[in-house]
Image: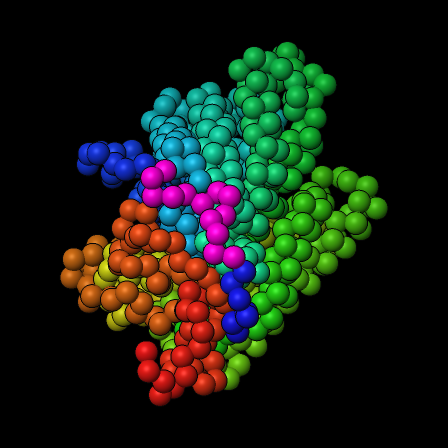
Amino acid sequence: MADAHPGTADRLPGAIEEGELYHPRSWITRYVFSQDAKIIAIQYSSTALAIGLVALVLSWLIRLQLGFPGLVSFIGPSEYYQYITMHGMIMVVYLLTALFLGGFGNYLIPLMLGARDMVFPYVNMLSYWIYLLAVLVLVASFFVPGGPTGAGWTLYPPQAILAGTPGRDWGIVLMLVSLILFIIGFTMGGVNYVVTVLQARAPGMTLMRMPLTIWGIFTATVLALLAFPALFVGALMMLLDRLLGTSFFMPAIIEAGQRLRHGGGSPILFQHLFWFFGHPEVYIVALPAFGIVSDLISTHARKNIFGYRMMVWAIVAIGALSFVVWAHHMYVSGMNPYFGFFFATTTLIIAIPTAIKVYNWVLTLWRGDIHLTVPMLFAIGFIVTFLNGGLTGLFLGNVVVDVPLSDTMFVVAHFHMVMGVAPILVIFGGIYHWYPKVTGRMLDERLGKLHFWVTFLGAYLIFFPMHYLGLLGVPRRYFEIEGLSFVPASVSPLNAFISVVAFVVGAAQIAFLVNLVHSLRHGAPAGPNPWRATTLEWQTPETPPAHGNWGASLPVVYRWPYDYSVPGADRDFVPQNQPGLRRAGASA
């Protein structure tokens, strides 16, 4: 609904005027070393998708060994653990975090807020190039003696830096250096996002008129700026343990009859540092996904979001609570039972604001004019998947249940449903939704629906059986489970089935890539606002938006972002920058 007045149309403190914009003077400064947030967003997204394809191939190799053990000779125990480590780290940090914050964040924050660009464009450019350097350092570990680290994506010491662990010479060093570089680059970008949201909003764009996508990205960025330093210092201290022989995390150890020079360190300290980052990381990925899904549902159901303020405060509450639940990943570390009770309680409490968001999405869909477009299919798929994954999380948040399940395939299934499948569905939905704005072309709908159904149904055929495997006691991170006395014979054919489906789902992503490339030139013209959306990014003078986004003057915001199907309006949507309702039959 519209607010009475936009407040003031005066320039806000951080708003960038035309004269302050950096104007590129060559092809290189326009498209390579670009300071335009839209180009930087495309660079982030392209790099993240490229390294994500590497992670996809690694997952195929993992499933090849699990489903058909010994079929190929080049996958031995060392290679298997290296594939697991690199797949996990790439997906969580270098794909999901970079794509949600670096990709969607850079493209949508200035456009949705009515700004000309990020407040610090040069720093924004540096953030991408440091991210790219981090990715290249990570990829380089595949080509060094010993290969990449095989310590598991959580990199727990002392295992990570002891002899016998794959990649303990160069692999772990490059992994830690890459993480340090990633955090430095993200910090540059994150400061940009926060300052831009707080200081560069268009006239009339109050905090409570921001789309939920921006609320999700903003809150996730604040979380990351507070949580990533824990990983930064953990990676730096482990690097010192490995290279200089310090003992931050290394206790006294005898190896092959010889006492190592380490002594007095605490491996549990690294676990606390890692998970103090690791659990907020779940919401660093989830909160932007929550915001994007909210906007997709409202737009494609032609209905205002239910309980906007409640949704905002739920995002903020989830962000705050995410810092007091980290040790539910450490129930098997031997913690005091009172701490186990505390973290089990906070884990259940954080489910409350998350459940509020699910209720509000369902109530937004209730009696809406639902259009089953490709973005809407992915949004609904996310809600179903996140709900199912969240329910299994309630089991793992309970100490008594988590202890016997903690090292089984049940954890793999839960983690992938919540942290793998669900956010990737949102990424696809967001790309299908905003691709027309980025390129001026529509993606092919038939290919999009084929891509959705194979991905969505295939994900369930992969990970639902994994819950069953976990309940049978099938351990995770085992190179080979054939011949284990406690593993039933039925596990082998089920593992083979899961692997075949994983190959099919992975191959289905080719349809998505073909759609992206083919539609760039041959897609149907999108027009300025193909989804008839209300938010500011769809109201730019040009599509795709030109440098500076808004032409001669910034937009003025008069209302919240979800005026759909307003009684008496001449259209079923009222843009945020429309001063008053135009009644049906009234002259323009």
Tell me the magenta residue range: 8-20
Nearest the eye: 495 or 329 = 329
Determine the residue positioned at 41% across, 50% down. 115
Nearest the eye: 443 or 199 = 199
Q: Is residue 368 visible?
A: yes
Determine the residue positioned at 52% across, 25% down. 164
Q: Main secondary structure of the magenta part?
A: loop
Left or right of 124, for residue 245: right
- In the depicted structure, whether residue 46 falls above or below residue 391: above
Q: Position of residue 540 (x, y in %)?
A: 32, 59
Q: Position of residue 172 (x, y in %)?
A: 48, 26
Image quarter of residue 452: bottom left
Which quadrant would the C terminus be assigned to in this image? bottom left
Q: Position of residue 33 (x, y in %)?
A: 29, 33
Q: Position of residue 268 (x, y in %)?
A: 69, 32
Determine the residue positioned at 51% across, 77% down. 365
Q: Is residue 383 visible?
A: no
